[in-house]
Structure formats: structure tokens, C-alpha cells
Amino acid sequence: MSVDKPNAHVSHREVRQQIKLPFSKAVEISLKSIKIRFARSIITAAGIMLGIAFFASVRMSAEFSVIHEKIVNETVAAFQAGKLHHITEDQTRMISSATTDVKAAKQDALAARERLDWLSIMALIVCTVGITNAMLMSVTERYKEIGTMKCLGALDSFIVKLFFIESCLTGFISSVIGFLLGWFIISLVHIFTDGLPAFGAQYWTSSLTLFGLSVLIGTFLTFIATIPPAFRAAQMPPAAALRVEI
Amino acid sequence: MDANEYVVRTKGLVKEYTMGDQTLRALNGVDLDIYRGEYISIMGPSGSGKSTLFNAIGGLDKPTSGSVFINDVDMAQLDAQELAYLRCHTIGYIFQTFNLIPVMTALENVTLPTIFAGLSTDDGIERGIELLKIVGLDQRLHHKPFELSGGQQQRVAIARALANNPSIILADEPTGNLDLKTGQEIIALLKRLNVEQGVTIISATHDLKMLDISDRIVWIRDGRIDKLEERKNIELKMGEMEGEPVH
Ligand SMILES: Nc1ncnc2c1ncn2[C@@H]1O[C@H](COP(=O)(O)OP(=O)(O)O)[C@@H](O)[C@H]1O
Ligand SMILES: [Mg+2]
């Protein structure tokens, strides 16, 4: 077994700079971290997942009211124009619920929806703070690992990258799950109240838009939440690797 | 080996820790020259400043005053990226608590420094397998740290320290968390690597088993070098006790 002799190439003239690692390496290491620390990742993810689920359900309800109103208007218009002779059971139900809505009641509903919108935004902010907190704790737990990586030659920027990739992946995945959760539940509810006519082209386009919006917001908020922990981690001195807990 | 070539030199090294209004002098003027290729043990009671010296030599902490030269480069002159390069290529670290990355297998742990050094994945893996073979763990490549015994974890850590062919291996109490027999095995392994690979080994310890295999022993007390012994002299002294006059 032969191994090259130690390198003594660091001399007066030649002090080299540490290289920057390719992004793919950071992704690889981050994925391992998420997989192994699954429990911790779930806790971080649960916050953003529930927040996004709530957000998606509130927004989806609003979309349904718009769709609902549109169908009612169209049906009534068609009926009045004499184009429609037969009204289905679903349509009857939707129209009757729409016509019992007096103007005041409609405004109440609108105000309630606005309150819910605010509530969902507040929920998302609370989630963001929660993630920052959970990640800061995870930095404290991982001081030895971070210190060791620095001893092995990791640059501060690499540690920052690790944390950002880890949290963005977690944020993305939990936003997708959160959206599906909120979206599915609200859709299920509306199958029973509005029936199938509500699930037309407009339903699918608004679902898709909301999906994009939810994932964007969820990932972005997780990213923002990770800024303080990531920089705290990068500032961890390499000497932290030596600390021995008693 | 050029006996006059120093791999590490420290000059008037002082390290003070300030806590509140109290200042503690952990290192109080340490001048130490370490030859390339030697096995040097830093001995001393707990709290004498061994780890502080380890930090200073390893570029992990800045001394309050004084300087450290690694291969004739003044560490204080290096910026963050150059320090990282030094840690990656020139020094291999071994810790009392092994410090393997818990989410990675033995092989991935050993490969990690090669990734930081810019080696391709395939080359890194080849190197990792070779090193794990050297430390006798080629049957445990894909075990996670928690699936390995303390001695095995320290072997992985030693393989990892060697990953980028460092000129220096710095070990802080490498046997501190191991039982007597395992500790002896680790010491023997370090000595073997010192002889076979020519890597300089600097080991802070209060494990007297280290005495037998060290080329020199630095006794440190209260942040100062108390005495510096060569093994030859220790052996001579033993002879002296048997009645042979020296000097
Ligand atoms: N980070 C620190 N902050 C304050 N005091 C420290 C710190 N590290 C070490 N010390 C003090 O410096 C002295 C030397 O410590 P250390 O180098 O760890 O000794 P050893 O490794 O020989 O046991 C001790 O009195 C210790 O309490
Ligand atoms: Mg110590």
C-alpha cells in the first residue's frame, strides 16, 4: 500500500486559496442531512406545511365563491333568455343559495373572507418565525459538525449554502404537501355543496395558479427564515469542533 | 529527511481568554520548533493549555500575541480562504470525540476532505477506500458512525485526517474516549502512519502510553513549556538509574 508523501507545497510564495465547491456537492450533502435528521426536518416542515395548507384553503374557498357566482349568473341569464329548459338539481341548489343571499349577507361574507386572508398571512408569518427558531436550535445542535467541516476545509460560504439548500428543499416539499392538503379538503367540501358543475376549466386554472403561488410563498418564506440561522452557522468557529460536553 | 527542516514553529505564543473582567492566560509564551516527520507528544495535566496550543497550531483560533509558522508561512498573514486551504491540505485533525459527520458513512466521511480539495467523486472514493484499508476498516465502508465502535470511529477519523496527504496530523487527546486496549491500538496506528507515511504527528495527551512511541515529549504546565525531552534521553535516564553515569 503506497500513499504519496505528504505535500509540503505551502511555501512563502505559494499560499493557495481554498476552492469553491460545485453546487451539486452542496445539494448532495444537504439531501443526506435532511434524510437522516428526518424528525427535525419534519418539525421544520410541519410549520410551513400547515401554514400553506391554511393559506391554500382560504384562497381556494375564495376561488370557489367566484366560480359559484359565475355559474349562478350564467345559469340565470341562460334561463331568462330561454335557452335553458331543464335545470339540474345542482344548479337549483346553487341558485337557491345565491338568491337567498341578500346584499348585506354578501358583504358580510366578503368581510369574513378578508379576515381569513389576514389570518392566513398572520399564520404564515408565525410559521416563518417558528422555522427560524427551529433552525437556530439545529445550528446549536450541530456546532460540532459545522466546526469539523471547517477543520476539513469548508469555507463559510459553503456552510451558508448547505443551510439554504436544506431549508429551500424542505420549504418546497412542505409547501407542495401543504397546498395539496388545503386544496384537497376544500375541493372535497365543495363537491358536496356545489356539485360537479363547479369543477370546470376555471377550477383547474385557479387551482394551478394557487399551486404556483403557494409553493412560491412557502419556499420564499422558508428561505427568509433561514437567513439568521445560516449566518449564525457560518460564524461558528472551527475550534467548536474540539468542545467536549461534560 | 532534513533534520533542520521545521514543519511548525511557534514564537512567544500567548493566548488569553477574557471572561467578563477576568483574563486567563492559557498560553504564556510558548516557543516550540517541530521537525518534519517527528512524532511529538504534548503532555500535561488537564487545563494546562494543550488544547489551546492545538488550536493555535491548527489555525483554529488566533493567538493573543506571538506567531505560528507552518512550513515557514506565518499563519497570521493568511486570509480566510488561505486558512481554509491550509486546514484542508496541510493539516489533518483528530479529536477526542472523533467528530465524524453523523449523517455520512465511513467512506463518505473520509471522502469529504477530498471533495473540499476539489478531487472528482471517483478519485475521492478510490482514495477513501485506500485509506480505510490502511486503517483496517475496508469491511466497514458503508457503516454510519453510530454503527461503529469508538475505536473504529477513531480509525475512520484518522483515515479522514490523511485524506489530502497532510504534512501534519494534529491530534487532541486521541485516546481520551477509548479504553486502554483500543487506545493502545490507536497509538500504534498513529506511530505506524508516522513511520510509513512520514507524516508529522503532534498529539496533545495526558496518556502516558504515548511516551513509548514519541520522538520528543513537550511537558506543558500552566501555559508554559516545563521541559522538552527526547526519547533517547529518557532511555538514557533509565540507564542512568541502573548505574551507568551519563553526561
Ligand atoms: N474558550 C475558552 N474560554 C475561556 N477559557 C478557556 C477556553 N478554552 C480553554 N480555557 C481555559 O484555558 C485553560 C487551558 O485550557 P485547555 O487548553 O483546554 O487545557 P487542556 O487541553 O490542557 O486540558 C484552562 O484553564 C481552561 O479553562
Ligand atoms: Mg484539552
Image (cartoon, coloured by chain):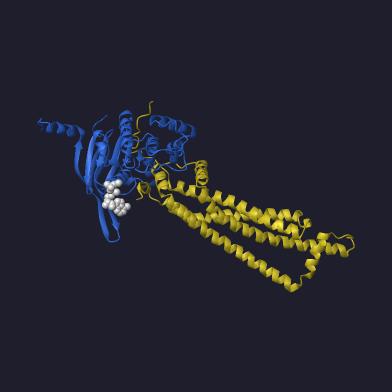
Chain colours: A yellow, B blue
Which residue corresponds to the image point at 41% horizontal and 50% vertical from the top-left? A143
Which residue corresponds to the image point at 66% horizontal and 59% vertical from the top-left? A57
Q: Quadrant of residue A2?
A: top left
Which residue corresponds to the image point at 73% horizontal and 63% vertical from the top-left? A65
Where is residue B215 drawn, in percent x and y?
A: 24, 34
Q: Quadrant of residue B213?
A: top left
Q: Nearer the viewer, residue B88 or B110?
A: B110
Which residue corresponds to the image point at 26% horizontal and 49% vertical from the top-left? B47
Q: How many marks?
A: 0
Does any portion of residue B97 appear in the rendered image? Answer: yes
A115 is higher (above) or lower (below) than B156: below
Quadrant showing the C terminus of chain B: top left
Where is residue B128 drawn, in percent x and y?
A: 43, 33
Does any portion of residue B64 appear in the rendered image? Answer: no
Q: Nearer the viewer, residue B176 or B130?
A: B176
Where is residue B170 drawn, in percent x and y?
A: 32, 40
Asked whether, in this view, residue B68 is left or right of residue A26, the answer is left
Where is residue B59 drawn, in percent x and y?
A: 33, 45
Quadrant showing the N terminus of chain B: top left
Q: Residue furthest bottom?
A: A104
B84 is higher (above) or lower (below) than B107: below
Asked whether, in this view, residue B241 is left or right of residue A133, the answer is left
Asked whether, in this view, residue A19 is left or right of residue A224, the answer is left
